[in-house]
Image: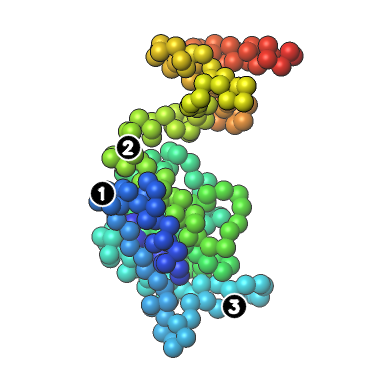
Amino acid sequence: MRIELVTLFPELVESVARWGVTGRARERGLWTLGVVNPRDFATDRHRTVDDRPYGGGPGMVMLPQPLEQAIAAARERAGGEAKVIYLSPQGEPLKHERVAALAKEDRLVLLAERYEGVDERVVERCVDLELAIGDFVVSGGELPALLLIEALVRQLPGALNDAQSSIEESFVGGLLDCPHYTRPEVYEGHEVPPVLLSGDHAKIARWRLMQSLGRTWLRRPELLAARGMTSEERELLGEFEQEMQQRTGS
């Protein structure tokens, strides 16, 4: 996969992308990152990339000309037909299904905004998809873009040391992940659930599914409503509810 990122802060992107899973996958040649700075396409000696918004109001708006040329340069470097994704608070909420679909693309161009946003004509002319990472606002699109990049890279074959990790994570299959435990068996009076020490893989898998269903029911019930459940899963969720009632005495 080749990703080109249009940003006013290439050093920020490069410094973060070289760490962790994304950094190791990059070293293995599983993906490449390029950055394009719109300032390189500004036409004045001050390398201006923003101006006041028409109609008044606070802040500045990114100028269309240097931004569109930067996007064009990024698409050319990525391979011409690369999909352009704009990280924007107005975008489609980013979900695992979208990440999995985008991870199948060979080339992507990501647009990181600054100031109050970009001239809407650039969005209309150049952008294929707008994505938002949550219902909140940050100062620029670089961190959202880096989050998207890590989510994408984790889906690439060979990116994770254990291929099973990407299959059992939260949101895969529409559920939150189950609880995890490691040594020691007893920590500050709290024991690891006995089933995890049993060595019975079928029972462990059943317990983990029950915990995933229960956590999703407690914390993100809308995910369950959208996903639906099999009869076996409804039975497991019933067991989870009974165990909760026994623990709480209600």
Tag of residue 52: 3
Type of amino acid at the residue the image marks with label 2: Asn
Residue 185 placement, left or right of 25: right
Looking at the rendered structure, the secondary structure element under dot 1 is: loop
Q: Would you place residue 123 above or below residue 212 in this image? A: below
Q: For the point 42% across and 67% down, which residue is it?
A: 11
Q: Would you place residue 217 above or below residue 87 in this image? A: above
Instruction: Estimate the spatial distance between the alpha carbons at disc 1 and disc 2, rounded to whole Å.
Output: 12 Å
Type of amino acid at the residue the image marks with label 1: Arg
Q: For the point 46% across and 50% down, which residue is it?
A: 147
Q: Mark 1 highlights which residue?
A: 28
**Residue 239 visible, this orientation:** yes
Type of amino acid at the residue the image marks with label 3: Arg
State which tag comes first along the sequence, 2 or 3: 3
Q: Position of residue 91 (x, y in %)?
A: 52, 52
The one of 195 and 158 positioned closer to us in this rendering: 195
Mark 2 Cα within 10 Å, few/some/many (few <14, many 20+)? Answer: few
Looking at the rendered structure, the secondary structure element under dot 2 is: loop
Confirm or deny contact between disc 1 and disc 2 (CB under 8 A): no
Q: Residue 172 is drawn in which quadrant?
A: top left
State which tag comes first along the sequence, 1 or 3: 1
Mark 1 Cα within 10 Å, few/some/many (few <14, many 20+)? Answer: few
Residue 161 placement, left or right of 196: left
Mark 3 Cα within 10 Å, few/some/many (few <14, many 20+)? Answer: some
State which tag comes first along the sequence, 1 or 2: 1
Q: Position of residue 19 (x, y in %)?
A: 39, 52
Instruction: Estimate the spatial distance between the alpha carbons at disc 2 and disc 3, rounded to whole Å.
Output: 48 Å
The one of 14 and 47 positioned closer to us in this rendering: 14
Which label lies toward us, 2 or 3?
A: 2
Q: Position of residue 178 (x, y in %)?
A: 51, 26
Q: Mark 2 highlights which residue?
A: 161
Q: Position of residue 42 (x, y in %)?
A: 42, 80
